[in-house]
Image (cartoon, rainbow, N blue to C red):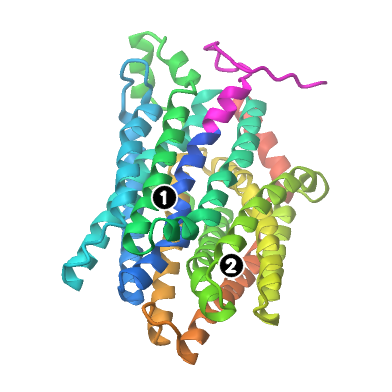
Amino acid sequence: MKMKFKLFSRTDDENAQLGVAEYFAYGLGNCGTSFLNRFLNSFLVYFYTTTIGLNAAIIGNILLAAQIIDGITDIAMGRILDRTKPKGKLTPGRLWMLRGCILFAVSGVLLTMVPTSASKAVQYVYVFVTYNLCCAISMTVVQLPYQSLVAKMTRNPIERGHISVFTTLIQPVSGTIVSATCLSLVARFGGGQGGYVRTVAIFATCALACHLLCIFGVKERVVATGQTKDAAEEKSQKAKPENQAGVLESFRILVKNRFWIIYGVCILLYFVMFNIMSQSSAAFAENVVGNVNYHGTWMSWQTIFVTVGTFADFFLFNFLGKAKTWRFGAIVVLGAVALQLFGADPTLILVANILKGIGGGMFMGCSGAIMADAMDYSEWKTGINPLGMGLAVVLFAQKLGGGLSASILGQILDAGGYDGTLAAQSASAITAIKICYTYIPLGAMLTVLVLTCFYTLDKMLPEIQAELSERRNGQKA
């Protein structure tokens, strides 16, 4: 059957075919977040240690603490979102995105406005407050409601797949722009702290524009349809929710699900690997390869090839299945990191980063489906699908991976005697940079590969889904 696309969809039917414009608008939401998130992951630690002169170990610990706080705000935001009522034409997801996106843009710029005339203690407090404001509060207020929109825009599983494809196409654009232009823009604006402030202000403005286009370009049809129910029906549903559990009960269900545990640990380790390489890439390019500008080139090509790996999943699913495709992605990333053991030639590192992009696209392209399958397993075992809590904890694992990587990076660089204000680093500092850029990611991905070998849910899934389908149709399981 030939698939026909249309430009717009103005219907409120919750099973409607969406227009390309709405796919694009939704994708812009993730694109907007990436404008600042890529700067945070790839350049922020470098800025703090080289431009402001802060201690790498202390910065790492601050970022780790912030990610723990972020985990609390993720769960809190999920509960708040569930209890929010529409306001005018804005349904809960878009309402909270609108509230958060302006603060996200402003707080992103504030990150770079560290008071250089203040004492070091005041500067560290400033970093802690502004980083939490940006990541633990405003990014959470934007991103968690944003991720809930897919389920609210349509119930049609095919349409949800199209949304994911368009998001995959659009998301790398902003990350590539940031990686390719950040340091050159800083230099164009005069370098130093002022150059960073102006550069991040541009990224923040782009982020805000993308978020606003997303908010006013999508429609939450499922919510709108639900609002037509009469008060008595709504009261009955609230009094007797189906397949719902409290926070503690949901968490107990999750920790008894071995497949969800494997998935969660793999995601945590993957983000430790990805973030510690991103955070140490500028230092590696500057001090090991000899030119900091290689960092932007490597990250740009890696981001571009993430899309290639993600699209490869569509074909690999048919031949290998989801679990083996997931494992194959881990193998490609592991091989790419191992390639860095053979030297620091800039072309070799570029090839390694391209392969990391392809493998990472394969690995993360499967992650949503792997997560959904693991939640089906919980529902099959207990009758409850703790999807909301599962999503919140996985988001926390991703952010914790960023915090752990920053802390590990800071501690190792500090132990090696790294000083970002020096023109040349000591031999021990160079070794510390290599450990962070190659050896820790190598160990993390090797562990991920081993864990994926124990993810055997694919073999059980047809039986599980058939039984769940019978239950949902009111038949005896």
Question: Does residue 227 appear in this view?
Answer: yes
What residue is drawn where x is 49% and y is 58%?
A: 184
Q: In this rendering, would 90 be left or right of 305?
A: left
Q: Residue furthest bottom?
A: 427
Q: Which residue is mark 2?
A: 294
Q: In this rendering, would 199 be left or right of 344?
A: left
What residue is drawn where x is 43% and y is 34%?
A: 209
Pick whichever of labels 2 and 1 is earlier in the sequence. Answer: 1
What's drawn in magenta, residue-wise? Answer: 1-26
Residue in front for this viewpoint, 424 or 103: 424
Please state the horizontal and vertical placement of residue 289, each as a whole percent of the image.
59, 78
Q: In this rendering, would 106 be left or right of 203?
A: left
Residue in front for this viewpoint, 341 or 440: 341
Q: Secondary structure at mark 2?
A: helix
Within the magenta stretch, is there residue 14?
Answer: yes
Please state the horizontal and vertical placement of residue 228, each as a whole percent of the image.
42, 9
Q: Which residue is mark 1?
A: 251
Crowdedness of circle 1 by 10 Å Cα count: few (<14), some, many (20+)? Answer: some
Within the magenta stretch, is there residue 291?
Answer: no
Quadrant of the image containing the N terminus: top right
Q: Report, in whole angstroms, how far the alpha carbon at label 2 lies from the one at label 1.
A: 44 Å
Q: Is residue 250 above or below residue 98?
A: below
Please state the horizontal and vertical placement of residue 64, each as a whole percent of the image.
35, 65
Please state the horizontal and vertical placement of residue 410, each as a whole percent of the image.
39, 75
Which of discs 2 and 1 lies nearer the camera? The answer is 2
Residue type marked 1? Phe
Principal SS element in the magenta part?
A: loop
